[in-house]
Image: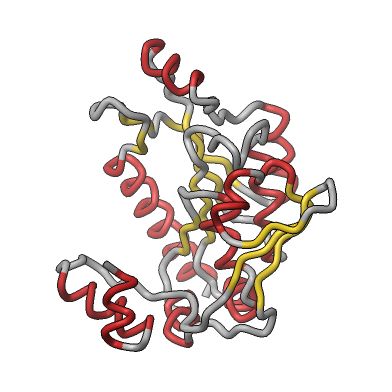
């Protein structure tokens, strides 16, 4: 749908705006760029990967990532949204093909450093076969820090247990739960991140998903706490 709308309007940003209206999306969706860019990566074996599909199949072997052209610019509205936000939320989503690409625009990383809003990373519930096999939550955070030059102020992670029958299905597909251990929790604390561990799990639909109600409540609570703290300091 997005591709067809882009071809009709001749502009990716306008296409997103049209779909916002057409689908009556609550909130506002802003594309990170209006330019045609390609996500690229180099593996530890020396191979060069181009495009989300190739990268999503060999993410666990990635040594470095970049975008082409390297001087692509972010949409000004996206930068303004970051700078004026009450909270900036990263994730949940595919590490190399969803989260990191947005952080590869210099203007985005700089805006994240400037904004007083808390930066919150919501970890995935499970590893993504092909993309994050064998990776820990700490590995995810390191990649985010390496790309953006900053460490999230908060890291949300789930401690709810996936029912055994459902877990077997995911394990068979090569996906395992992403859980926070005490060593990594201490390491994140030393890096300046506050770890929020809670049961964010929702399996009511027969699949592993975040409980949107619990996550939103935690996000609102932190945004309010940060706002009140900022007012007190000023």
Report the label total: 0
> What residue is rendered at 54% in x and 69% in y?
233
Does 170 sit above or below residue 48? above
Colouring rule applied to residues: secondary structure
Quadrant of the drawing holding the N terminus: bottom left
The quadrant in which residue 147 appears is: bottom right
x and y percentages locating residue 100 in the rendered image: 60, 60
> What residue is rendered at 57% in x and 50% in y?
95
The quadrant in which residue 61 appears is: top right
> What residue is rendered at 63% in x and 49% in y?
193
x and y percentages locating residue 14 in the rendered image: 31, 85
Does 183 sit above or below residue 148? above
- Front one among 220 and 161: 161
- Front one among 81 and 60: 60
- Front one among 79 and 66: 66
Does 220 sit above or below residue 2? above
The quadrant in which residue 20 appears is: bottom left
Does 78 sit above or below residue 103? below
> What residue is rendered at 66% in x and 44% in y?
58
x and y percentages locating residue 177 in the rendered image: 52, 26
């Amino acid at each position: 749908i997005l591709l067809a709308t882009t071809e009709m309007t001749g502009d990716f940003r306008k296409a997103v705006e049209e779909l916002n209206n057409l689908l009556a999306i609550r909130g506002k969706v802003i594309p990170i760029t209006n330019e045609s860019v390609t996500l690229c990566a180099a593996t530890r074996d020396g191979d060069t990967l181009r495009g989300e599909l190739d990268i999503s199949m060999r993410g666990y072997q990635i040594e470095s990532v970049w975008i082409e052209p390297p001087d692509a610019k972010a949409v000004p509205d996206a930068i303004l949204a970051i700078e004026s936000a009450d909270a900036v939320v990263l994730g949940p989503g595919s590490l190399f093909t969803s989260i990191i690409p947005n952080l590869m625009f210099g203007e985005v990383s700089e805006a994240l450093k400037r904004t007083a809003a808390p930066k919150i990373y919501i970890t995935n519930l499970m590893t993504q076969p092909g993309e994050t096999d064998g990776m820990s939550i700490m590995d995810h955070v390191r990649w985010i820090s390496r790309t953006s030059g900053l460490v999230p102020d908060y890291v949300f992670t789930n401690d709810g247990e996936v029912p055994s029958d459902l877990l077997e299905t995911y394990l068979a597909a090569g996906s395992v739960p992403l859980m926070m251990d005490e060593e990594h929790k201490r390491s994140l604390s030393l890096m300046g991140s506050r770890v929020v561990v809670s049961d964010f799990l929702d399996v009511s639909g027969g699949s592993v998903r975040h409980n949107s109600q619990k996550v939103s409540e935690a996000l609102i609570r932190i945004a309010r706490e940060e706002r009140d703290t900022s007012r007190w300091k000023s």
